[in-house]
Each structure stands twice: as structure tokens, then as C-alpha cells.
Image (cartoon, rainbow, N blue to C red):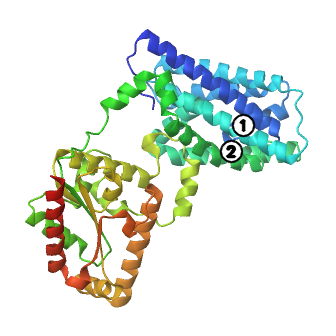
């Protein structure tokens, strides 16, 4: 939900101006999608369908009408919603509908014959609508009526907003498609462009939000001030941080613990899970089960595309966990010298000059034997665990960094523990670390 911020009159004026500009772009973007004749976004599919069935009311008029219904439903489902919030949504709805109709009127004589031109118009509409949504996000004035209603519904039925939003989009799109087929005999509001818009807009919104920070802070410098207040403390170059990544069955954790003990450094592994749990709604056991695990990058990317514009706390769970643990790792490193195991710490702290990144591996046969011995399991199960661990770490690394997990280029030291044994490997690494710290200081 939008957090109400006490602001000076000049800041409030700027936020409303940015928000109004966003509505202009969004209205123009919707008009471009309609003119492409390749289908509109899921959220616009019903208003556009109703305008085709009842042309006496414009697309903008139907958009405003449906949004007003969503505004009315909010206080019915949830008591205590501020009247000011509802009035803001009403004003936004009327302005949004007006700019849709104004844009369509300006493009009334535009006719696109070639399919390539229609695709170009569709892509332009996606980008323009995403750019307008970006303005709405940074303005932090109010939510769109549909987003506000779906958040109320999600809270009411105790479900995540993302799940409710996906179901809502599917229902609206399906309803629009059925109405078009029954009364018009063809799919006009829902076509290939609907799918393209559904997946492309979220990605573009995220791109604009992340890449146009300069424009964001130019228009609304208060956003930068608020960001700086929430910033993670910088990691002191006087703190030595050792990150240890390892293959399952290589003895990496045992080696990391011995290094931490010999050098009298704090050791962080499962402790990160506890710290992350304390500052979030995730239970420690849930974090332990889901951290660093992405079984399919293709499915994750597909969902990531679709949910690109969702609120920060409604991001896919793996991304929420990664960001949460990354913040914990940065705070740990800012506090003192330490040893950190796994969780892409080498990537998160890659720009820290006084850090050393180690990757511990071993021949597969040695890892299998170690896992069989340690876990008291048969060879087939040990092989499956090792391969599953490796696949999950590769996918996790690929998704959240520009590095390849296990690639020696991404570490300062890569060592095979079976060449020397766990004890000797730890001793060798301790000597190298001492030499590194002498050079650094």
C-alpha cells in the first residue's frame, strides 16, 4: 500500500504533477494499444469490450465507470479506508478516462494496414503505458483503483497480492474474450497483443524504475533523501571479509569454520537465516527451505516478466529472500571482519577491496563418498543430492548475478579439497589469507 508521507506543499504539488503526467502517458498508451487492433492489456480488456458492445459510452467512460465501481467496493470490503484516499482515486479515474478518450480522438484518422505497423504501434503503446506507470510509482500519491481493490481482497482472503492479481487478470481477459466471441463473433479486445502487453509492460516498468533513477531524483529529490535514510551502512575497507562458496560434499563448511576459528573471526552461515528471519515475515525454517533455490530459470523468468511492476514486498519469493539476505550480508560486513559462507556473498561484496573470495570443490567421486559417509545414505541418493544442489546454485547465481557459479574467474582462490584433505586445505588457505592481509595492511 502507499505509505502516507508528511510533505511540504511544494513537494505535494510536484508529486501530483508527476502523477498527472503519468496518467497522460498511460491514457495515450492505452489508446495506442487500441489503435494497433492487436489486443489491449488485461486491465483494459473489459472497458474496451464494453465500448464495442455499447458504443454510446466511450472507452474512457467505461474505464472510469468500472474503476468507480472498484472504488465503491473498497470500503464495503474493508472498513476504515480514508475518504481522502477514495477521493484521490476518483479524481485519478476521471482524469485517466479523459486522457484515453482525448488520445483516441487525436488518433481518429490514423489507420494501420500492414501488420508490422500494428506491431510497432502495440510495442509503442506498451512502452508509453509503462513509462506512465513509472511516473505513478515514483509519485507515491495513490494506487490505481484496481490495485487498491485487489490488495483489499488479498488481505480479506489471506492470500498474496501477486496471486490475486494474476487470477484477476486471467478472469478479466477470459470474460472479455467470451463477450467478444458471443456478441461480436471475433476476438477484438483480446488477441496476441494482450499476451505481449501482459508480459512486456512489467519488464519495462522495472527497467524504467531501476534505470531512470537520475530522472526520478531530479523530479522528486525527496525520494533520494528517503532512500539515503534507508541505505545499508558502507562496508569499511578496514574490515576483512572472507566469502566461502563450495560444492556440496567438498567439506567447504568444515574448512570455513576452521579458518574462522584459527583467525578468530566471526563465522556466518545459518546465522544469516536467523538474522533475516528477525527482520522479515519469513519464518527461519521457511528461509532455510527456500533460500538459494530456483529449480527452473525459465519458469522464474516468465513469472518475473509478468510481475515486474508489482510492489517490492510482492516480488517472487526467491527474489525477496535474496534481497533480504543481501542486506543482512552487507550489514554483517559493515560491522566487523568476518567469514561468510555461500548466498552469493562474493557477488554482493565484489566491490569491497579488502575481501577474499574462495571456492572449494572436489572430485565428484570424493564428494559422493563424503556425502554417503556424512548423511548415511546410498550412492544413488548421494549423487542426486549433489546434482540437485549444483543445479539450484547455478540457477540462483544466474538469476541474481552476472556471474557463473563455480567459474574460477569469479573467485580469488579455487581449491580442490580432496588433493590435500580438509585439514591441510584449511591450513593452506589460512596461510594465504594471512599473506593477503599483510599485503593489504
Q: Position of residue 132 (x, y in %)?
A: 62, 30
Say whether residue 152 is visible: yes
Mark 2 vs mark 1, CA separation in Å: 9 Å
**Residue 140, position in %: x, y?**
48, 26
The residue depicted at 51 percent of the width and 46 percent of the height is 162
Query: Circle 1 — which element?
Result: helix
Quarter of the image that includes the N terminus:
top left
Q: Residue at x 70, y 45 (%)?
A: 173
* Residue at the spot 29% in from the left edge and 59% down from the top edge: 285
Badge 1 density bin: few <14, some 14–19, many ≥20, Cα 10 Å: many
Residue sitting at the far front: 439
Q: Secondary structure at mark 2?
A: helix
Residue at 79% across, 36% down: 34
| Marks 2 and 1 close (CB-CB < 8 Å) | yes
In which quadrant of the rendered view does residue 60 lie? top right
- Answer few, some or many: residues within 10 Å of disc 2's Cα (few below 14, many 20 plus, some between 14 and 19): many
Q: Nearer the viewer, mark 2 or mark 1?
A: 1
First of labels 2, 1 by sequence position? 1
Q: Nearer the viewer, residue 182 or 393?
A: 393
Q: Is residue 37 left or right of residue 392?
A: right
Tell me if residue 231 comes above or below residue 20 in the rendering: below
* Number of numbered markers: 2
**Residue at numbered disc 2:** 197
Q: Locate residue 417 relative to residue 148 in the image: left or right.
A: left
Residue 61 location in percent, x, y?
A: 74, 24
Residue 53 — which label? none
Say whether residue 49 is visible: no
- In depth, the one of 38 and 364 nearer the eye is 364
Residue situated in front as seen by the camera: 408 or 203: 408
- Number of the label disc, if any, that sits on residue 125: 1
Amino acid at each position: 500500500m502507499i505509505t502516507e508521507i508528511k510533505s511540504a506543499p511544494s513537494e505535494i504539488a510536484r508529486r501530483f504533477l508527476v502523477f498527472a503526467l503519468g496518467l497522460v502517458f498511460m491514457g495515450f498508451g492505452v489508446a495506442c494499444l487500441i489503435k494497433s487492433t492487436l489486443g489491449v492489456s488485461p486491465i483494459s480488456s473489459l472497458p474496451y469490450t464494453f465500448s464495442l458492445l455499447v458504443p454510446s459510452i466511450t472507452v474512457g467512460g467505461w474505464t472510469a465507470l468500472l474503476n468507480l465501481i472498484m472504488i465503491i467496493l473498497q470500503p464495503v470490503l474493508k472498513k476504515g479506508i480514508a475518504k481522502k484516499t477514495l477521493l484521490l482515486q476518483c479524481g485519478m479515474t476521471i482524469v485517466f478516462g479523459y486522457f484515453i478518450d482525448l488520445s483516441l480522438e487525436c488518433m481518429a484518422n490514423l489507420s494501420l494496414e500492414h501488420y508490422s505497423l500494428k506491431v510497432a504501434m502495440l510495442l509503442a503503446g506498451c512502452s508509453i503505458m509503462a513509462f506512465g506507470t513509472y511516473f505513478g510509482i515514483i509519485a507515491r500519491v495513490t494506487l490505481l483503483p484496481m490495485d487498491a481493490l485487489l490488495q483489499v481482497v488479498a488481505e480479506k482472503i489471506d492470500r498474496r497480492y501477486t496471486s490475486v492479481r494474476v487470477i484477476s487478470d486471467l478472469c478479466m481477459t477470459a470474460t472479455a474474450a467470451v463477450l467478444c466471441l458471443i456478441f461480436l463473433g471475433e476476438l477484438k479486445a483480446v488477441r496476441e497483443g494482450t499476451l505481449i502487453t501482459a508480459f512486456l509492460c512489467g519488464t519495462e516498468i522495472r527497467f524504467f524504475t531501476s534505470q531512470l533513477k537520475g530522472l526520478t531524483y531530479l523530479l522528486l529529490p525527496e525520494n533520494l533523501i528517503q532512500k539515503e535514510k534507508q541505505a545499508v551502512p558502507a562496508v569499511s575497507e578496514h574490515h576483512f571479509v572472507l566469502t566461502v562458496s563450495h560444492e556440496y560434499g567438498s567439506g567447504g563448511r568444515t574448512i570455513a569454520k576452521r579458518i574462522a576459528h584459527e583467525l578468530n573471526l566471526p563465522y556466518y552461515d545459518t546465522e544469516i537465516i536467523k538474522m533475516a528471519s528477525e527482520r522479515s515475515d519469513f519464518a527461519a525454517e521457511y528461509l532455510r527451505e527456500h533460500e538459494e533455490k530456483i529449480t527452473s530459470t525459465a519458469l522464474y523468468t516468465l513469472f518475473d516478466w509478468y510481475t515486474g511492476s508489482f510492489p517490492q514486498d510482492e516480488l517472487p519469493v526467491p527474489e525477496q529472500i535474496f534481497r533480504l539476505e543481501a542486506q543482512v550480508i552487507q550489514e554483517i560486513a559493515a560491522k566487523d571482519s568476518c567469514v561468510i559462507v555461500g548466498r552469493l556473498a562474493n557477488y554482493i561484496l565484489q566491490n569491497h577491496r579488502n575481501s577474499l573470495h574462495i571456492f572449494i570443490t572436489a572430485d565428484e567421486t570424493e564428494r559422493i563418498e563424503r556425502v554417503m559417509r556424512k548423511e548415511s545414505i546410498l550412492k544413488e541418493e548421494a549423487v542426486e543430492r549433489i546434482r540437485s544442489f549444483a543445479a539450484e546454485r547455478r540457477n540462483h547465481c544466474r538469476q541474481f548475478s552476472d556471474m557463473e557459479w563455480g567459474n574460477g574467474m569469479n573467485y580469488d582462490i579455487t581449491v580442490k579439497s580432496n588433493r590435500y584433505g580438509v585439514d591441510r586445505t584449511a591450513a593452506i588457505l589460512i596461510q594465504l589469507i594471512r599473506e593477503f592481509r599483510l599485503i593489504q595492511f
